Image (tube, rainbow, N blue to C red):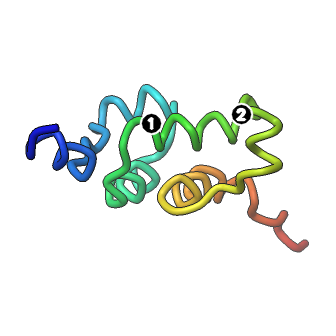
Amino acid sequence: CSMAEREQPSHRNSISRDELIRVAGDVDESTLLAILALRPTIAEVEEAAAWITGSGDVVDRAGHPLTGVIAQIFDILTADEEEPPPIR
């Protein structure tokens, strides 16, 4: 195992804006910027998106709650859905 190989896991390849749009779908500019500010990897965004669509593994969903960047992405992407209805 060379030194370069040992350093590789600490180097994160952040998702690009185009990749984020492809994975997250049609989201507004403020949502894009909030997610990009987290500097997530494509895998992190894909995992958050899988949870949102309900396609995550049931065992994983029950046994491994979302944490870290993935949880933050999930919260950002679902923020609009969780707003209570306006009081009349």
Q: Report the disc number at residue 56.
A: 2
What residue is shown at x 84% (from left), y 63% (from top)? 85
In terms of image quadrants, where is residue 75? bottom right
What residue is shown at x 82% (from left), y 66% (from top)? 84
Q: Nearer the viewer, residue 27 or 34?
A: 34
Residue at the far bottom in the pictured view: 87
Q: Earlier in the sequence, mark 2 or mark 1?
A: 1
Residue 79, x across and y down, in percent: 64, 59
Give the answer, above or below, for where 71 lies relative to 46: below
Left or right: 26, with 81 as reference point: left
Q: Report the disc number at residue 43.
A: 1
Q: In what quadrant of the picture does the N terminus appear?
A: top left
In terms of image quadrants, where is residue 34? bottom left
What residue is shown at x 75% (from left), y 32% (from top)? 57
Q: Secondary structure at mark 1?
A: helix
Numbered label tally:
2
